[in-house]
Amino acid sequence: MGQIADAFRHAFRDFVTDGVPASGKNNPAKSEIRPIGQMIEQAIGDGTGNVDAKVEAEREAREQAVSDLEAADAALSARIDAVQGAQRKEPVTFATTGNITLSGSQTIDGVGTGNGQRGLVMNQTNAAQNGIYVTNSSGAWTRATDADTEAELLGAMVYVTGGAVNGGLAFGLATKEPIVVGTTDLLFVQTSGDPEGLAGAVSDLEDAVTASTDEIETARRGTQTLASGIEVAIPGRALRRLKEAVSDPLTQYVGIVAIGDSITWGSGASNPGTSTPRDGTLADPRANYDSPNFVNLLKRYLQETYRSGPGSSESIGNWPASPSGQSDALYQKISAVYPRYGKFTVSNLGATAPISNQQDSRSPTYMVLGLPHNIPGQDYGHQIAFPFTGSMFTLSVRITQADLSMFFDVLVNDVVVQTVNAQEGNNGLVVDAGNFDQQIPITLPAMVHDGVVKIRTKRNGLSGNRYLNVTALRIPRRLSVRNQGINGATTVSYLANNMAGNPNGHGVAVPASDRFVFIQLGVNDRGRGVRPNGVNQFYENLNALLDNAALDSKEVILMISNPVENEDPATYSFTQQEVRNVIYQVGRERDVDVIDNYAIFRGMDFEEYTTDGLHPNDLGHSMIAENVIRAIEGA
């Protein structure tokens, strides 16, 4: 055994009489305790040197890393702002690779310039001559009418359709105002190395900014941990997947449930509403939505961060069996994505005609994905595949002429679930070349979790050349948060009254559609009225709750409640610290995430953050909400 452990054993040794241990422990003198502190300091010094200096050096290194990453992130953000805020010009057929004469017919980058072609001139010795031009085979070229003034040039971005070197690339004007056309040097820079053009540039830059932001947050959290010395969460799989789900445009539905006792319900927060009558089931009243309890604060944060802005909506309701309050919040934001980049895969299943990828500002995504099918004997033409969680989406299409469109199959995990007629006269579709947003709603037969959806174009017996022109995939991204906190609940009562197999007829606390479950119980399990009681029994009861069928395939996050003032052993068989120990133990054993809402109150008086030594006041609830949010965002 080590020197320090031996010293502690000696200081707190048993009484010994004639070699036989007696009841009780030695009451150590100060002279026996002081040397142990010195030994600990010496051991730390021997193992790490000057601890304060090393921590400070590490903190400075991390802060420098954050600073460096933020600088890189700012540069990436500037690029993506330029792409997303750009004036997207009609494509050009060529772009120069060197200084040219701005007149007559010539060959540039392998492209012959005829009469009336749009071209990007960007390599002139006199850079003031750069710009977008219209060619003249027998005379001087003129600047394009959509790019011959300062207002039209600022932020200009253009896609190049042809050329050995520049074909398939996009270029943007980097010159800032003021611009005097013909006098100010114009500098064009490549904004996309993706041969598919502008949407690829946006996707690439967004991915880079996301990666950079994640790296900054990781570095910053490391610095904050060094500064605070408090571990507030054990992040793992579920928190990370929750963050990914609320951020992912292809996750149509995210369901979150909060299970707990009166603290989760919202007791202690202002304006909670009535909590009676109650019987410990899902038929109990719920807290008001405007009460600032930690679950409501989490709801509002998730809404404001992930489901606000244009196309967003809010629906507040209550569990069907509950007579009052508002337990449920549903937030929605409709997002339109172009089904070609990022997580989308477009492939040819039998059509020989190539896929087209065209820019058009009339499209909701500024792009049109053309899927031609020119082989009469081949049923399937092309396929769009993408990962998906949810039950619905809408396909936006353009129909330019009669008898040109076709059918498509919708598959979930390679099983056909729907065949859709995308011809005019069906599903509300009409021939209208100017309408780039005719919407075909798709409802899947069941909720899909981490599945793969495929859209396969098919003739279905149709003759002639056929096309499906897709402009967007619209996803109503829904975020549901339910507060299923029940006043007075223990792990035993919650399992019996509200989980799968309960006899009460009020439903199950965790609906099948909802995937993420926060569980904060244990405060009431301490009571001596719980039979059998004791910390070991709490361990068994918590595991029994987690084994319930309602939590099968769910992403569970365990949470530890705040410290409580009353730890009277006549009333409680174990302490809140022991509750904390058990939850950590179960979390480690099950590889389940744990958020520690106990440690954040360290050093505070009970009257600062509770109303009665148990239930958090508005400040206490806000601190818990902030801790949960930090755990989610830091995962």
Image (cartoon, rainbow, N blue to C red):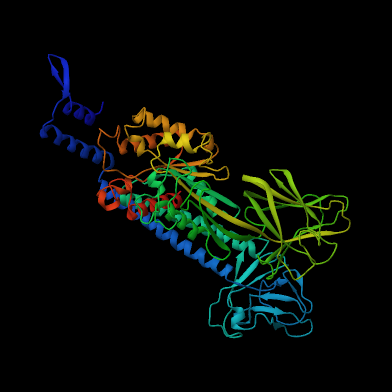
Please count the marks in the image.
0
| In the image, residue 351 above or below residue 451 | below
The image quadrant that residue 65 belongs to is bottom left
- Residue 126 seen in the figure: no
Residue 172 in view of the camera: yes
- Expressed as whole percent of the image width and height from the top left, the position of residue 175 reads 55, 76
- Along the line of sight, the residue nearer the viewer: 27 or 216: 27
| Residue 397 figure quarter | bottom right
Residue 257 against residue 178 in the figure, above or below: above
Image spot of residue 52 (x, y percent): 26, 49
**509 and 187: which is toward the camera:** 509
Q: Is residue 173 left or right of residue 589?
A: right
Along the viewing direction, whichever of 467 and 544 lies nearer the viewer: 544
Q: Nearer the viewer, residue 522 or 193?
A: 522
Residue 339 lies, with reference to residue 545, above or below; the image says below
Q: Specify the quadrant of the image occupied by residue 423.
A: bottom right
* Residue depicted at x 21% and y 40%: 41
Image location of residue 445, percent across then percent down = 68, 46
| Image x and y of residue 577, in percent | 31, 38
Q: Residue lying at the far front in this picture: please name it.
A: 277
For the point 29% across and 36% down, which residue is it?
575
**Which residue is located at x 31 percent, y 50 percent?**
228
Q: Is residue 623 left or right of residue 381?
A: left
- Quarter of the figure that contains the N terminus: top left
Residue 85 higher or lower than 409, as above or below: below
